[in-house]
Amino acid sequence: MGETQGPLSGIRIVELGGVGPVPFCCMLLSDLGADVIRIDRPPGYDGGVHGDPRFNLLHRGRRSAAIDLKQPGAADTVLKLVQRADALVEGFRPGVAEKLGLGPQDCLAANPALVYGRMTGWGQTGPFAHEPGHDINYIALTGVLHSIGMAEGPPVIPLNLVGDFGGGSLYLALGIVSAILESKRSGKGQVVDAAMVDGSASLMTLCYGLLASGYWKDRRGSNRLDSGAPWYNVYETKDGLWVSVASNEARFWRNLLSVLGLSEDEVPDQHDTNHWPEMREKFAAIFRTRTREEWCALADGCGACIAPVLSMTEAPMHPHLRARGTFVDFDGILQPAPAPRFSRTPGAIQRGPAQPGEHTNEVLSDWGISRDEIAALRQARAIV
């Protein structure tokens, strides 16, 4: 593979194929320029997306080698790749990597400077460590799920953004990059244990601080950021669409009232929580008098912190996102562009998602496995 583009160019990472949080973490690292090779299961495993693998955008940017880790010689081959890597990333249940001969002890013996990134929901230790689970289970345990939703309704599932990707992938990516920086100084590797329960709890730091202060009520839909406040909420418009309102600060609150055609004398104090329910009803009735487009046009340039609630189909077409190139068309698929942005070493989508095993020979050869060894592995059905 030629030189990658981005601030992590020159960093080599081995990804033991999985679903969800680990692929998203490795997609981010690849977008930032790391040369990530994905060790996939043999073809036939779709990694969580049914149908054509080219639509599995979490796999973009990496080459794929199909290696059956349960076959003789497979683990030794991965350890040879590890010798040339800066990091390895795995998302198995605790103990599985060790049974395959690819646990931290095995890999750090092969490369003492290696960063070994581990992703689990519950963590490597604790009473739940070996229990199955998914995103909402992890955020349910940390107070996140309880806190999202309307006061009169059940908890609202925030897709799998908070546990899998926010509390998992992003924390693991930060941990891996941090540990690589430290390894370059010390020459010593270490294990990064990224648990989605830990990351999800960390994301709630602000709220737990507010709870301790007495400012935050431990009831869903009762606070300024959880749909309790009328000036931080969503409202349905005349055409059945929605707008978001986030007029937190006093000046934005005054601007919101101006857009709604209200004076400060007509409404209670902004922070009078006793009157929030009636204020929400008043605002809701007013927002239902115009279409979403009309409200956005009326609010344009007024500093009221009003934005349309766009669907996934609408979002890429919005003028602001088009101007910034927030979405890009790559290989005929519209998708989010790499983020964040760098002034001197911008990241890039290195390539589209690979077919499982598409680059097996190429990857192994590039990373120092001889032609004879590759032939022997193929004969033993360790690679496909």
Image: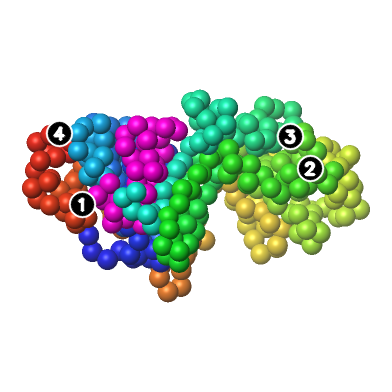
Question: Could you tell me which secondary element the residue under label 4 belongs to?
Answer: loop
**Nearer the N terminus, badge 4 or badge 2?**
2
Q: Residues within 10 Å of mark 2 (few under 14, many from 20)?
A: few
Image position, residue 112 (x, y; %): 37, 54
Is residue 81 covered in magenta?
yes
What residue is shown with label 1? Answer: 363
Q: Nearer the viewer, residue 59 or 319?
A: 59
Q: Nearer the viewer, residue 215 or 197?
A: 197
Work out whether 306 lies above or below 194: below
**Nearer the N terminus, badge 3 or badge 1?**
3
From the viewer's perspective, is the residue at label 3 or at label 2 nearer?
A: 2
Image position, residue 77 (x, y; %): 22, 44
What residue is shown with label 2? Answer: 211
Cα separation, mark 4 vs mark 1, equals 17 Å
Image position, residue 187 (x, y; %): 41, 62
Question: Could you tell me which secondary element the residue under label 1 belongs to?
Answer: helix
What residue is shown with label 4? Answer: 381
Work out whether 267 lies above or below 1: above
Report if the CB atoms under discs 3 and 2 are less than 8 Å apart.
Answer: no
Cα separation, mark 4 vs mark 2, equals 57 Å
Report if the CB atoms under discs 3 and 4 are less than 8 Å apart.
Answer: no
Q: Which mark is residue 220?
A: 3
